[in-house]
Image: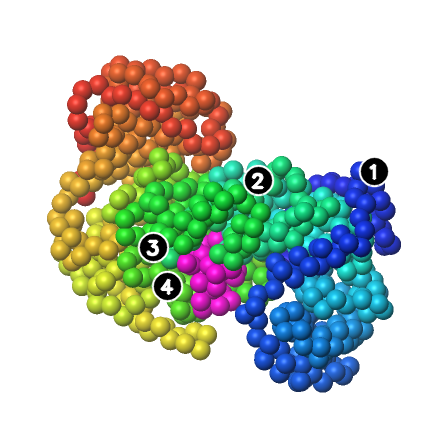
Amino acid sequence: MAGCSRRVVLLLGVGGLVGPEPRRPGWTVAGPGDFALVRRRWREVTVDRAYSVAAARRQAAAMAPSGRGLWRDLPYPSLSATPGRLLAMARAYAVSGDARLRAAVEGGIDHFREHVYAAGAEPVGNWWHWEIGAPKRLLDAALLIGLSGRPGRALCEAVDHFVPPRRLHRYGGTSTGANRVDLCLVMLLRAVLGGDAARADLAVRALAPVFRYVTEGDGFYRDGSFIQHDAVPYQGGYGLVLLEGLATMFAVLRGTPWEVTDPNRRVVYDSVARSFAPFVHAGHVMDLVSGRGIARDPEGGAVRGRRLAAAVRRLGLTATPEERRRWRRLLDGPQPVGHRLFPMSARAVHRAPGWCAALSMSSDRVAHYEHGNGENLRGWHTGSGMLYWWGEGHASQYADGFWATVDPYRLPGTTVSTRRLPDGAGEAWGGARPPFRWVGGATDGRYATVGQHLRGLESTVEAFKSWFFLDDAVVCLGAGITGGDGAPVETVVDNRRTAALLTADDEEGWAHLAGHGGYVVRDGGPLHRLREHRAGGGMSRPYVTVWLGHGVDPDDARYAYLLLPNATPEATRARAADRGWAWVLANTARQQGVHVPSAGVTAVNFWQPGSAGPLSASGPCAVLVTERGDGSATVTVADPRRDLAGVTVTWNRPVAAVTRRPPALTDAGTGRRLTLTFGPLPEAATVTVRPLGSGRSSPKGKEY
């Protein structure tokens, strides 16, 4: 709702007008029939027959207009609730045609305008309520009931006061991303109510910046990220609002003089698969892209999932048949296995048979967390390497009161200081960010190496964390863990909302949580365990927490453990006993890497130039080597810091030839070893090679 981008970019000119928007060369000339078509389309597209007429009639009967409000339970200003209730009644009228409902809505709009939303009134509090929340609902209701005459003109004058045309002359400040779409939607509804073709033109043309990929700030990124408030990944909040608004405008305006024809609108259609679908699991939109909204509703992920499905269906009204078929497969069925990395928003999603995981990090460009308007005041550590995962039968693991009851200092996957923090610690609206740039990784689409140079929120804690995502496990490494807060530092292996039985073998270094999966600790133990009921938000939930303690003010502590989703006790015990299943090539503040022979994976996160096992790099980067069964291998290299002029990577393995060369590859040497030289790497580059000899490489490291 609020936050403010620091960027201000000129779009349509300087200044603005309080009166009618002037016509400009090439802008639309429209007649009453065109506006009638838009009003009819608005009703067809936005009104659901499921709206409760009986509930609306009860609200109409309960109206008691006075200087203090329309309803006794909603004292003015009530900028969200009162317009929202009037809109619900207007939708019920559109379904039923009940004249009494129409009269109640018309009177209610005028009363609210006279007492609260009046032309000339001074907006108090959050700008969003005055420029988006209230006018969008009031104008929507006005169109549905066919408001006209003096009440219609008076509402137009009020909206013009709070949202004049000049509001869309600049792209920046609070007029970016989803807020921009909402402001354009308000301008369009105002234009239709008042029969103003110039304002309708402005509403559509001012969408143009939203259709462009960005490289910083708010909007869609080419890697699939969506950012709002400069630094908050937000597909599940503002991104969803943007998609709903654009899908509605596309559908309502098709076949009218204001049909959205900008060729760059393709970005919106592509975003369904690129930006939204990856963050859907079992009908829930994941919390790691939902900002401060995670604290609003115990079942928020499912609610957002239903909204996303509805928005995609609406977007399908103007999409191709093939797009509609593809979207149904993405949203209605299981997502395809594989890994999606979103380096521009410090997020990753991994899918394997029977389970799914998602990783939330922070960097100098991505916030620790977002709080604002009194919401999400204890989300402090959600960007400290929180590892969400869902096994079979646990789609609602992070729903059903999770955020109201979980220990905010023990979020799964995080490394944190236990020093107590005040509610709302750090700058609001995503303004609190760590100073480090190395956050991201490399993926071949199936496996991935991901890393985070961590700095705690309002803390001296620093750590180097790496995750290696495989078919049946996540290998988790931590090194260089230091801190001077005067408080214990912990790495939370997991924190599950469950009362399931936890069994453990401290001597062999493993634990198993019935119905969930297993954990194998190789370094940094022992594994601490806690079973408790936690209360919050008027509810109580059971939790099982397992963590590694690094002591008070640690100096260069480290850890290594495996997360085994869906594993049985027998499989967990067997993996613990199989110390050659994976080799740790390095686990320091300079490099972290592993070799997993059964997967043919060798991966290293180079925090600094150097060597780890068979891999060397001339600069900080992430390297993933995957040796395939057909005798080929891929080498994927990424620059998570996004600042290398070039980098050379060496794989100490005989290679016969390079069979696929990405544009960023400037030189390649084969023979006794493979040497790859790259120029700048704005995105990861994958090289395909044909190694010499048969079988996979066997680099040596520390068994675990």
Q: Are marks 4 and 1 in contact (CB under 8 Å)?
A: no
Residue at x-position 21% and y-position 30%: 629
Looking at the rendered structure, the kind of residue marked 2 is Arg
Q: Which residue is mark 3?
A: 389
Along the horizontal axis of the image, is 162 left or right of 592? right
Along the horizontal axis of the image, is 437 left or right of 140? left
Residue at x-position 41% and y-position 28%: 685
- Graded by Cα atoms within 10 Å as few (under 14), some (14 to 19) or many (20 or more), the crowding at tag 2 reads few
Q: In terms of depth relative to the viewer, which is nearer, 257 or 652?
A: 257
Q: Which residue is mark 1?
A: 25
- Badge 2 marks a residue whose secondary structure is helix
Magenta span of residues: 283-308
Q: Are marks 1 and 3 in contact (CB under 8 Å)?
A: no
Q: CA distance from mark 1 to mark 3?
A: 55 Å
Instruction: Name the main secondary structure of what is drawn in magenta.
Output: helix
- In the rendered structure, which disc, 2 or 4, sits on the residue that comes first in sequence? 2
Spot occupied by residue 319 in the image (x, y as percentages of width and height): 54, 45
- Graded by Cα atoms within 10 Å as few (under 14), some (14 to 19) or many (20 or more), the crowding at tag 3 reads many
- Badge 3 marks a residue whose secondary structure is strand
- Badge 4 marks a residue whose secondary structure is loop
Can residue 289 be spotted in the picture? yes
Q: CA distance from mark 2 to mark 4?
A: 33 Å
